[in-house]
Image: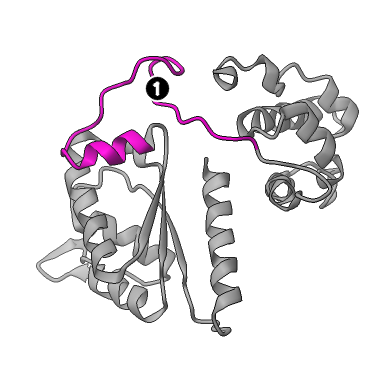
């Protein structure tokens, strides 16, 4: 989900760059993770400030607690042309934290005409339930009662391959195998798509399992033969993807 969220941000930033004059100071997209136990606007302002490289100061009345960074964050959003906020891990919110969080998001959205994209297990249901100030109940079906959202596979063909290549590049850049060279995984892009059907979950399972075996057997590289030996990463075997 994090990889898909980043692809959304990169695509949006590309659109902005193609439509507006070049500006090295522009920040069209903000990407943050849900902070631990975010019970106040102070807690929510800090990850925004960290992304924007704003150094939080200590509140004078409470030296042990960081000051609310909402004002400087809002200044940057207003002056740097921010239009999209990507929020990862929204499922980590407790019921008691939902109202405060979405009040904060609502303020930013209405004040600066920015949009929010939420990512996490059951994100759509959580966002819908936030209007009522409580967590949505677990729906029927899905994996163990966890809310699920059906998504289409990432396409891959001679005419449409860019998105899939960007996804594979992300995995490629994060591999830390001794005999892996940058771009090796991209050469297997067609095979990976055929194997996984273009779905992120089988792809992640397949690459992670292959990397672990490459470490264990000492080859320290992912090859087509190694991928074919893996039992995981076949989209036809995943019951959730067949619903």
* Magenta segment includes 138: yes
* Magenta segment includes 219: no
Relative to 108, does residue 227 appear above or below in the rendering? Answer: above
Please give the residue where the numbered disc 1 appears in the rendered image: 146
Residue 226 visible in the shown view: yes
Question: Which residue is at 61% across, 75% downward?
Answer: 18
Residue farthest along the front direction in this orientation: 159
Q: Quadrant of residue 209?
A: top right
Question: Which residue is at 59% across, 22% downward?
Answer: 241
Front in this rendered view, residue 77 or 217: 77
Instruction: From the top left corner, tell me how far across and down residue 102 is, in percent.
Output: 23, 50
240 relative to 55 in the view: left or right: right
What is the image's colouring?
A: one colour
Q: Quadrant of the C terminus?
A: top right
Front in this rendered view, residue 225 or 236: 236
Instruction: From the top left corner, tell me how far across and down residue 107 is, in percent.
Output: 21, 62
Relative to 80, does residue 238 appear above or below in the rendering? Answer: above
33 relative to 65 in the view: left or right: right
Q: Quadrant of residue 138?
A: top left
Residue farthest along the left direction in this orientation: 61
Total numbered badges shown on the rendered structure: 1
Q: Badge 1: few (under 14), some or many (20 or more) residues near its Cα, within 10 Å?
A: some
211 relative to 42 in the view: left or right: right
**Is disc 1 placed on a helix, strand or loop?**
loop
Tell me which secondary structure the magenta stretch mostly adopts. loop
Relative to 178, does residue 204 appear above or below in the rendering? Answer: above
Instruction: From the top left corner, tell me how far across and down residue 29 is, in percent.
Output: 46, 65
Residue numbers of the magenta segment: 124-153
Question: Which residue is at 80% across, 51% downward?
Answer: 159
Front in this rendered view, residue 18 or 222: 18
């Amino acid at each position: 989900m994090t990889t898909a969220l980043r692809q959304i941000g990169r695509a949006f930033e590309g659109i902005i760059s193609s439509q507006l004059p070049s500006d090295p100071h522009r920040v069209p997209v903000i990407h943050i993770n849900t902070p631990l136990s975010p019970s106040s606007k102070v807690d929510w302002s800090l990850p925004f400030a960290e992304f924007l490289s704003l150094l939080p100061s200590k509140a004078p009345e409470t030296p042990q607690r960081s000051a609310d960074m909402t004002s400087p964050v809002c200044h940057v959003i207003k002056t740097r042309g921010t239009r999209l906020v990507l929020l990862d891990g929204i499922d980590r919110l407790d019921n008691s934290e939902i109202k405060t969080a979405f009040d904060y998001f609502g303020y930013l959205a209405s004040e600066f005409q920015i949009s929010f994209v939420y990512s996490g297990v059951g994100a759509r249901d959580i966002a819908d339930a936030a209007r009522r100030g409580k967590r949505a109940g677990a729906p029927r079906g899905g994996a163990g009662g966890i809310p699920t959202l059906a998504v289409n596979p990432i396409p891959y063909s001679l005419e449409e391959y860019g998105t899939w290549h960007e996804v594979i590049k992300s995995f490629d850049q994060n591999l830390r195998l001794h005999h892996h060279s940058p771009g090796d995984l991209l050469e297997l892009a067609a095979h990976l798509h055929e194997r996984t059907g273009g779905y992120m979950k089988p792809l992640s399972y397949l690459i992670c399992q292959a990397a672990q075996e490459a470490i264990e057997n000492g080859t320290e590289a992912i090859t087509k033969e190694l991928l074919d030996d893996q039992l995981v990463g076949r989209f036809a075997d995943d019951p959730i993807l067949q619903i």
